[in-house]
Amino acid sequence: MREQISVKSPEGIEKMREAGKRLAKVHEELKAAIRPGISTGELNRIAETVIRDLKCSPNFLHYNGFPAAACISVNDEVVHGIPHDEHFLDEGDIVSLDLGLIYEGWHSDAARTYGVGTVSKEDALLIERTRQSFFEGIAHARAGNYLHQISNAIADYAESYGYGVVYDLVGHGIGRRLHEPPEIPNCHVQGRGPKLKAGMTLAVEPMINAGAPDVYWDEEDGWTVLTEDGSNCAHYENTILITNGDPEILTLTREERE
């Protein structure tokens, strides 16, 4: 039997709003720290320190055995990159920061991709268009619409530029647990999917490859997902709240809200 998609109470929604605001602060600190020469291990320590200073817990740390507070993925790494002190960012890299936190029992989850120093025009466009694909998708994220309208809109936009939309990885519901129903594909899906209701909370997260959509899992660490063809990938994610009108984005930074 399919598990029901939870509709949050007003009290739960307020907790998730606060969890989202606090996660946005973590992302602000991480963005400010990115520079050539910094290690992904140092970025992870910054993330965990800020999360704990905000009186929250890192929900990625030890989740299914993941060893860090943040997934930090560079260039052709799609998601779930494990931070290391020996992995230094270089000028021209692109780096994806995916992380979340728990505030009073409620989860938030968000990802951003940034250029390190000066990046190529192609990578800058990949980052911006991946971000925009998220907004194209959530234009359909309102009560009365159907889940796969989000998926199809993301795919329509990204594929119009010739990008590969990762189909092996999906977004998800979120709330008392980091991963709740439903799964949210970013690729084209047949059928409408479940009907959206006000009070649902979703983590929508396009993962877009500059090349083909195919990916593989690193056999050594068992976590890192990479593009099959070695092309770069960008990732953009927010936790959103479904309403009767436009969705409320819970994890935008101050800069993004302006």
Image: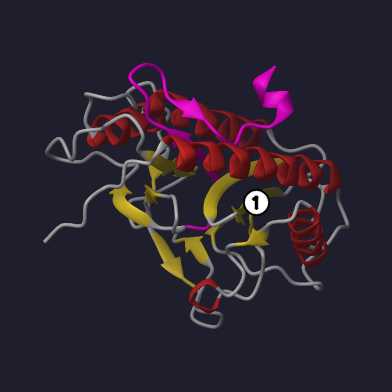
What residue is at 50 percent from the left and 26 percent from the top? Answer: 132
Is 235 magenta? The answer is yes
Compared across the picture, whether 43 is left or right of 199 comes to right
The amino acid pointed to by label 1 is Leu
What residue is at 30 percent from the left and 36 percent from the top? Answer: 151
* Residue 254 position in % (x across, y down): 72, 27
The residue tagged 1 is 97
* Residue 60 position in % (x across, y down): 58, 64
The N terminus lies in quadrant: bottom left
Q: Which sits in the foreground, 15 or 126? A: 15
Q: Which sits in the foreground, 227 or 169? A: 169
Q: Which sits in the foreground, 211 or 206? A: 206
Can you see residue 143?
yes
What residue is at 22 percent from the left and 23 percent from the top? Answer: 144
The magenta segment is 229-258
Quadrant of res 3: bottom left
Residue that sits furthest to the right in the current view: 37
Q: Which sits in the foreground, 164 or 8? A: 8
Quadrant of res 203: top left
Compared across the picture, whether 32 is left or right of 58 comes to right
Quadrant of res 176: bottom left
* Residue 237 position in % (x across, y down): 52, 41
Image: 238 above or below 6: above
* Residue 35 position in % (x across, y down): 86, 48
Can you see residue 206?
no
Q: Residues within 10 Å of mark 1 (few under 14, many from 20)?
A: many
Image: 247 above or below 69: above
Image: 125 above or below 211: above
Local SS, label 1: strand
Image: 156 above or below 41: above
